[in-house]
Image (cartoon, rainbow, N blue to C red):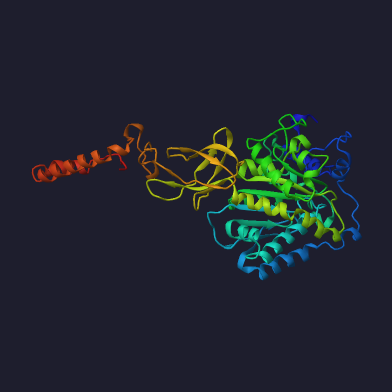
Amino acid sequence: MAISRIHPLFLLLLLRAFALLPTQAAARGGHDLPDDGDHGSISRNLLQDKPHITEEMARGYMSNAELEIAVHAFGSRCSNISRIYSIGKSVNDFPLWVIEISDKPRQREAEPAFKFIGNVHGDEPVGREVLMHLANWLCDNYRKDPLATLIVENMHLHILPTMNPDGFTLKWRGNANNIDLNRDFPDQFFSVNNDINYRQPETRAIMNWIKQEHFTASASLHGGALVANYPWDGTKDTGKRYYGCPDDKTFQHMASVYSQSHYNMSLSKEFEGGITNGAFWYPIYGGMQDWNYIHGGCFELTLEISDTKWPKAAELPVIWEHNRMSMLNLLASLIKSGVHGRIFAADTGRPIPGSVTIKGIDSKVRASRTFGDYHRIIVPGEKYDVMASMEGFRPKSTRIVLEQGAVNLDFILDPDGADVLGNDYGCRCGNDMMFHVQEAHIWLYLLILCVLLTLYLVFKRKTASRLLAYRYSPRRPVAV
């Protein structure tokens, strides 16, 4: 049968069948990492797509049911600073529970928001255990420890202990459909993952979550190495080399905050300073990290927090202690550094969802719709030209010097005065009937209107018949 005569539905089903075939994958997902000998033991650990995980190895880890109980128990015990909610369900219908921690967890505030995601890969369960340790530590130490109090009172922290509960139960990398969730997101270079109909429910849940919440930054927890990874994760030509995103210096700073606070991550012999650019390590496509940055303005790190994917449960408290200060310092850095503020409209005084850009950095951070608040992460110790803009308003910029503390900077934007009247009010005027009214001319128009009205009243009786005929003659509507 000729190729041209093959039914399109048959081709679609054939491509889908190939996509569901099991594939060998690296720890962060995406293209395979060739075992060229340059990666040593890390390469061997990461390429175990389906390692044999015995019941003995899994003993001591919370099951999905036990994790669900632990999440709700936390919500009851720490109800004054927490909210429990679900962002969706897995393939096998298990809820994806989130813990929100804040001094006002049920309210929206003009504060930065951060999310931690664990267990993206089913065979990397350390993150789900460590994140429950983090939640409980914050609850136990709120108003006792300065760092815990700073975080709870000045940001909204969202914790998703498991993104892949089905993969955890099956003790393999992918979800119940055997799809690697860390290469299921839309990719900036290749459109292979851009069909929404084939995207996994866990992936869709994360994407919808980003639309609902205004996240400043985030991190996903993985296992199989010990390093803080940052964008970009892939390259245009799929080559393995350093490929930095516009905020490369900022991401290096964030990764270093984590690595330098870790017990031994910064001492790595494999990765200088315990950090790495994703594409330089090995390229992947369809990753969650790059998608967050591009589509959510959310600065995300991929944190490999355990050399072993499935360490003995007795080692989990030690792994938590090794990562505790890293996680706390990363969260605190959003509050204690960067530039923060709100954007207002000069004519109404109301907050507006404008954008903030930094001169020389080709990326933007959007302000929230509710409060017009923005939170821009930048490297301390430098000068920056910060600009706020929004369609229909004149942009404004100012220079700041960011030292070690945060800078608070509000913008009040003036309307640009070039809006077309009537378009927002249903006026179907032709081009010849559209008026571009400048703000400075408004009083002149009002004066002319008053004069015409006075003349109309004076001569009303003498010209009644003529004016009556004019009033009811057909005219085009004009918004004023």
As drawn, is 177 to the left or to the right of 253?
right
- Where residue 436 sits: x, y (%)? 34, 35
Depth check, front residue: 16 or 379:
379
- Where residue 211 sits: x, y (%)? 59, 50
The residue most toward the left is 462
Q: Residue at x 74, y 67 (%)?
A: 69
As drawn, is 398 to the left or to the right of 125?
left
Depth check, front residue: 404 or 333:
404
Q: Residue at x 38, y 44 (%)?
A: 426
Q: Residue at x 54, y 38 (%)?
A: 357
**Quadrant (top left/top right/bottom left/bottom right) for the N terminus:** top right
Number of callouts in the render? Answer: 0
- Where residue 478 sits: x, y (%)? 31, 41
Residue 257 visible in image:
yes
The residue most toward the bottom is 77
Q: Picture quarter containing residue 41?
A: top right
Residue 94 visible in image:
no
- State whether residue 189 is above or below residue 140: above
**Quadrant (top left/top right/bottom left/bottom right) for the C terminus:** top left
- State whether residue 296 is above or below residue 171: above
As drawn, is 58 to the left or to the right of 375?
right
Q: Picture quarter containing residue 252?
A: top right
- Where residue 439 sits: x, y (%)? 32, 39
As drawn, is 168 to the left or to the right of 255?
right
